[in-house]
Image: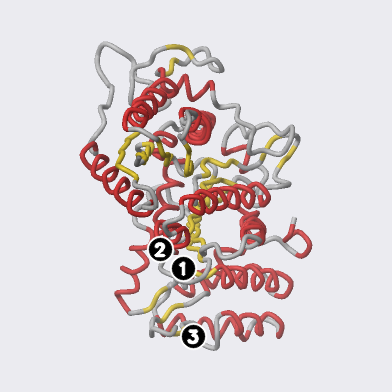
């Protein structure tokens, strides 16, 4: 007798997690989604012949011996989401699973699920009105009861549940307390108050996993769990040491099957990425990963950190076949299309004022270059490269050559090695760009000497 394959996928996970503006409520929302995905939904798959195949990234894939059992699971998943979160929802789909036809059944159930999600897509109700107060944390639903931590503030029921789940410590070093807010993370940074928000995503996982698992259900389960565990261990390992006075100086917002969103002190981004890569590559033959990173003041809205980092992640994925990163250091609160703005400026004279995105090797080389320049050049000279790169072409080239003549031999050699004899260099596609402004931007966030690995 054929089995039935079910796919259950949480709707708008990131919208649910990141809608509140308070860090502890975001943490609580993330904890609830993780528990639903990793614990509560798999707990519904317990009967004879039932089995959980994968449970990553908000998606549970499971097999059942009968249609009735598959439908019972779908109903239970929807009910469990509503019970635990009040507002979060999940979409489900099922299909017949003939023996030995795993890949065919998986593709079909995924197709059916995507159709259901498209049918349900639409705007959500914004709960403002003259007869009730709107929740000050999410701005979407009527306030229902006072916060347990802030007795003068009334949250909606969904945010009250997020708050109750907010003391999550499963991803923290033993005994460490969660960060109170982004300010407490920023205070551990140098320069103080600057946060790096990183969005990390494995490349083309939707193709990689089916390709390597093929028609083998057990192999799909093993690879799926290997990816989750590798990404989780690499993230936690790279955050080791980010504790000050018993409180974590980082926040892991999300760890899905193949992606991570987290905030760390801005000057720790180089050490974090190096360690993450080292631990990630201990597992052979996983696909490359891409990183979108936004550096800004700790008062910058978390929602904007996430939006810009996701845009930069898409840009980083333009580099194929290797780990990659695109980043932006944001000083303006009114930031819109980061990657597109670069192209608009380049359209005026055909030259890009940045070399971004970079492979991770190139990004590490930038850090090394800045560290070397800190030993050999005045800060004012290197910082001036940002303004030089944004001047008109002839003036920019002249100012760069003048700067080369005003620094000592060691600094001159490093600038020539990193930037070149001319300010703008062409890559293999003929695109002309410069690393000068990128060097200048990173100056403040690169540690000296032995501090670099701490």
Q: Residues within 10 Å of mark 1 (few under 14, many from 20)?
A: many
User: Could you tell me if the residues under marks 3 and 1 are in contact, i.e. CB atoms within 8 Å?
Assistant: no
Cα distance between the residues tagged 1 and 2: 7 Å
Alpha carbon separation for disc pair 2 and 3: 31 Å
Q: Earlier in the sequence, mark 1 or mark 2?
A: 2
Q: Residue furthest right?
A: 450
Write the residue at 43% across / 62% down.
211
Give the labeled residue for mark 3: 398
- Residue 310 visible in the displayed image: yes
Dot 1 falls on a residue whose secondary structure is loop
Image coords of residue 45 (percent x, y)? 47, 31
For residue 375, side relative to residue 156 (left or right): right
Q: Are marks 1 and 2 in contact (CB under 8 Å)?
A: yes
Q: Secondary structure at mark 3?
A: helix
- Above or below for 384 versus 306: below
Q: Is residue 78 above or below residue 363?
A: above
Earlier in the chain: of badge 2 and badge 3, it is 2
The percent coordinates of residue 79 (x first, y second) are 37, 22
First in sequence: mark 3 or mark 1? Answer: 1
Residue 414 appears left or right of 316: right
Name the residue at 61% across, 80% down. Answer: 415
Residue 357, label in figure: 1
Query: Which labelled disc corresponds to residue 253?
Result: none
Quadrant of the image for the N terminus? top left
**In this view, 235 is above or below 361:** above
Q: Is residue 139 visible?
A: no
**Residue 21: percent from left, percent from top:** 45, 33
The label on residue 315 is 2
For the residues labelled 2 and 3, say whether their Cβ atoms are less than 8 Å apart. Answer: no
């Amino acid at each position: 007798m054929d089995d039935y394959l079910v796919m259950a996928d949480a709707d708008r996970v990131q919208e649910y997690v990141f809608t509140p503006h308070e860090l502890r409520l975001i943490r609580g929302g993330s904890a609830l989604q993780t528990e639903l995905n990793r614990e509560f939904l798999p707990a519904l798959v317990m009967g004879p012949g039932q089995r959980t195949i994968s449970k990553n990234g908000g998606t549970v894939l499971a097999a059942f011996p009968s249609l009735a059992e598959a439908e019972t699971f779908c109903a239970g998943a929807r009910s469990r989401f509503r019970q635990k979160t009040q507002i979060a929802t999940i979409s489900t789909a099922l299909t017949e699973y003939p023996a030995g036809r795993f890949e065919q059944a998986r593709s079909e159930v995924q197709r059916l699920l995507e159709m259901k999600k498209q049918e349900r897509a639409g705007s959500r109700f914004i709960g403002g009105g003259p007869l009730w107060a709107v929740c000050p944390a999410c701005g979407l639903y009527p306030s229902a009861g006072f916060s347990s931590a802030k007795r003068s503030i009334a949250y909606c029921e969904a945010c009250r549940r997020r708050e109750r789940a907010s003391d999550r410590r499963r991803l923290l070093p033993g005994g460490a307390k969660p960060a109170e807010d982004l300010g407490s993370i920023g205070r551990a940074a140098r320069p103080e108050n600057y946060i790096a928000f990183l969005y990390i995503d494995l490349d083309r996982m939707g193709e990689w996993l089916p390709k390597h698992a093929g028609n083998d259900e057990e192999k799909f389960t093993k690879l799926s769990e290997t990816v989750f565990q590798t990404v989780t261990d690499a993230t936690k390992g790279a955050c080791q040491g980010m504790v000050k006075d018993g409180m974590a100086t980082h926040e892991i917002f999300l760890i899905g099957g193949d992606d991570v969103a987290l905030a760390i002190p801005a000057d720790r981004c180089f050490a974090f990425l190096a360690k993450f890569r080292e631990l990630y590559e201990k597992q052979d033959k996983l696909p490359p990963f891409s990183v979108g990173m936004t550096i800004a003041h700790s008062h910058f809205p978390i929602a904007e950190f996430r939006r810009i980092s996701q845009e930069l992640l898409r840009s980083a994925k333009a580099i194929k076949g290797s780990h990659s990163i695109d980043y932006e250091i944001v000083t303006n609160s009114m930031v819109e299309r980061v990657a597109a703005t670069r192209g608009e400026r380049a359209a005026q004279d055909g030259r890009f004022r940045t070399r971004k995105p970079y492979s991770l090797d190139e990004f590490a080389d930038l850090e090394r270059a800045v560290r070397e320049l800190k030993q050999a050049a005045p800060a004012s000279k290197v910082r001036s490269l940002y303004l030089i790169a944004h001047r008109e072409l002839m003036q920019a080239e002249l100012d760069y050559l003048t700067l080369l003549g005003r620094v000592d031999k060691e600094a001159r050699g490093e600038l020539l090695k990193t930037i070149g004899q001319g300010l703008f260099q062409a890559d293999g596609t003929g695109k002309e760009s410069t690393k000068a402004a990128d060097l200048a931007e990173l100056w403040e966030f690169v540690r000296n000497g032995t501090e670099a690995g701490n």
